[in-house]
Image: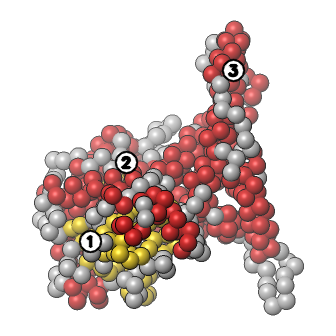
Amino acid sequence: MVRYKLLALIAAVATASTAAFAPIPPPTQSIFALASTRSSTSSSTTSRAKKSVRERTSEEAVSLIRDVVQAAFDAGPRAAPSRTLQAYIAITRTLQDFSPVQRPGRQAEQFSAPVALRKLFERLGATYIKLGQFVASSPSLFPNEYVLEFQKCLDATEPIEWNVVKKIIEKETGPITDNFSFIDKTPLASASIAQVHAAKLKTGEEVVIKVQKPQIDNLLKADLNFIYIASRVLEFLQPDFERTSLSAVAGDVKSSMLEELDFEKEAENIEEFRAFLRDQGLRDSVTAPRVYREQTTKKVLTMERLRGVSMVDAESIRTITNDPESLIITALNTWTTSVMNMPWFHADVHSGNLLVLDDGRVGFIDFGMVGRVGEKTFNAVSELSSAMALGDYEGMAQALCNMGATDEDVDVQKFGRDIEQVMSDMANVSPDIAAVGVSGDGTVQAAISFDENEVTNMLLKIVDVTEDNGLKLPREFGLLVKQSLYFDRYLKILAPDLNTSTDERMVALQSADRKVEVIV
């Protein structure tokens, strides 16, 4: 199965030394031009599927070599030595966790491949933590047990010293005293790629500064290029793997993760969303942080600090508004409308990124992860929503067939019955709030039993049903559904008696003639 092949590839790469990316001179056009000329006379004219590496043409070999050399050149030599040492330490410590030989007072853990790989990824640092999060958010690409385990992948690291942070800020934006009257030297949060500090501009506005950690760009480029090249080589040596689109998926992972390194791109996403709120007349009820462009670069993002509580903190929300039902409807309608009207959508609306502000507005934060929907998926989601509103499970099955890729005929009636069972399971899930709170620095601390696990399990059921019926759904559909499942849970907490199929306040009902409607 492709989901296991892709994960096996990433695991193999994780345990390999990145010393493969030693210094290599930039590729020259003349070398490849000569190679292409020499190979042109021996190229195969057949279009049949290749079964072994011996059937590869010279052009295909040249293409692979070009990709290898270019990837090595792009990655550069800086990250290789440190990655080799870090990989050795990470592998050694992970093996020790499961070894029968333990220090006094410790017991070996029972071996589990998903747990071992998750631990290894966390110890390998930034790239693999991000890859773990990608696995967790891509149930259509990876095995269920790994998707569930990687929900636990922790993106929390030791903060870098203030002196290092200060140098980065001043290199990117100029002397601190020219722009800021105060920066808290203790970070609000420290993750694999960046850490965040509270600050105040000289003009008096409270802000947060997101600072990219040093050399993280070189590290990610080296690791991701290595993964991409490994997939290309694997497909070259085993042509049958080409049907799994292994290198295409690896390329998508690479481009998606590298985009997160560009804080100017995230700033652009925030500003586009704020413009959308303005155009829709929503600024009185919904907001996103204001970006301060003069203090923002590719490696430093300065934005307004929003203070509020999590969307799952029902008790605190009731001290802010006496109508939490209208508030969650506003949040849901805003996200739904953005899907219908923007070229991308917020693809990470978990409870830490969707806030109820002190003034009663809804706050969307963290625009580093966005999804984009192609026309085919766009139209199919519209069909799916219409069928769902009518309770037409067979129509829902047909819409999913129109969206997915399949090499076989699908029994639409059976598929419809399977979907009906999944929808019934969804309706029976009840919220269970385990702990809620807000720390002194304004950081939201909330935990509900289904915020991740239940949402992921429901998404996995949907993926399993589609695959059992011979379909492969695009990743962007999985992202859309996961956000919709988050909203489904928030509705159960804040508006348990709301009927989204009949309530006239719902954008989905007001826009039956439009392209996309929310799935809850």
Quarter of the figure with the C terminus: bottom left
Give the answer, above or below, for where 250 lies relative to 499.
Answer: above
Q: Position of residue 381 (x, y in %)?
A: 31, 49
Name the residue rendered at 63%, 54% in the picture.
Answer: 219
Question: What residue did someone put label 1 on?
Answer: 203
Q: Position of residue 234 (x, y in %)?
A: 70, 39
Alpha carbons under labels 1 and 2: distance apart: 37 Å
Label 2 packing within 10 angstroms: few (<14), some (14-19), many (20+): some
Quick check: 482 left or right of 64? left
Give the answer, above or below, for where 514 lies relative to 158.
Answer: above
Toward which corner of the image does residue 429 lie, by quadrant? bottom left
Quick check: 349 left or right of 61? left
Q: Nearer the viewer, residue 309 or 140?
A: 309
Q: Nearer the viewer, residue 520 or 193?
A: 193
Question: What residue did someone put label 2 on?
Answer: 372
Q: Earlier in the sequence, mark 3 or mark 1?
A: 3
Label 3 packing within 10 angstroms: few (<14), some (14-19), many (20+): few
- Are the residues at dot 1 and dot 2 in contact (C-beta closer than 8 Å)? no
Question: What residue did someone put label 3 on?
Answer: 31
Alpha carbons under labels 3 and 1: distance apart: 57 Å
Could one spot residue 213 in this view of the protein? yes
Name the residue rendered at 46%, 40% in the picture.
Answer: 405
Q: Earlier in the sequence, mark 1 or mark 2?
A: 1
Q: Nearer the viewer, mark 3 or mark 2?
A: 3
- Element under disc 3: helix
Name the residue rendered at 32%, 71% in the picture.
Answer: 201
